Amino acid sequence: PGDKELEPLKYAKVATDASVSRRKVEGCILGITSLLSQCLGKGENVALVLRDVGVLLIEGRRAQMKFYSDFLERITGKRIQEGATFKVPQLLDMVVSRMVPVASLTLTGRVIIFP
């Protein structure tokens, strides 16, 4: 929903920030998207772990982003405590501890994890 435009990934910037070649960045992105596509095409549950951000869970037709509390604290500038009450209760479902096993976040307990 919404009229949001996608921006192309800036491979050169990613390469510079990660101190690797642009070619390596392109190869990694292509490899991950190809494997992700194959897994989803087979109906596998998938978890894409985004270091320092959180976990994107894809189960069947349902996709859900779970954010690490320290990431949310960095972007909001506010302290978020485990089990804290949010003004919007649904936000509590979007926060996950780094210590929680990724498979436990799924309905089935089975997932292919992309580190």
Image (cartoon, rainbow, N blue to C red):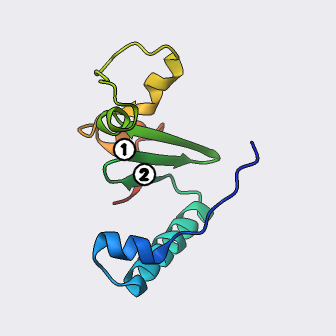
Dot 1 and dot 2 residues touching (CB under 8 Å): yes
Viewer-nearest residue: 14 or 59: 14
In the displayed structure image, the side of residue 60 where residue 65 appears, left or right: left
Viewer-nearest residue: 114 or 77: 77
The residue singled out by tag 2 in the image is 111
Query: Where is residue 33 shown, x and y percent of the image?
Result: 52, 70
Query: Where is residue 87 shown, x and y percent of the image?
Result: 49, 13
Q: Amino acid at mark 2?
A: Val
The residue singled out by tag 1 in the image is 103
Label 1 packing within 10 angstroms: few (<14), some (14-19), many (20+): some
Q: Is residue 67 above or below residue 81?
A: below
Residue at position x 47%, y 48% in the image: 56
Could you give the CA–CA distance between mark 1 and mark 2, rounded to whole angstroms? 6 Å
Quadrant in the picture for the C terminus: bottom left
Q: Given the current orientation, which residue lies at the most extreme left position?
A: 99
In the displayed structure image, the side of residue 70 where residue 36 appears, left or right: right
Residue at position x 52%, y 22% in the image: 90
Q: Is residue 81 above or below residue 105?
A: above
Label 2 packing within 10 angstroms: few (<14), some (14-19), many (20+): many
In the displayed structure image, the side of residue 59 where residue 21 appears, left or right: left
Query: Where is residue 91 shown, x and y percent of the image?
Result: 48, 25
Q: Quadrant of residue 25?
A: bottom left
Residue at position x 33%, y 69% in the image: 17
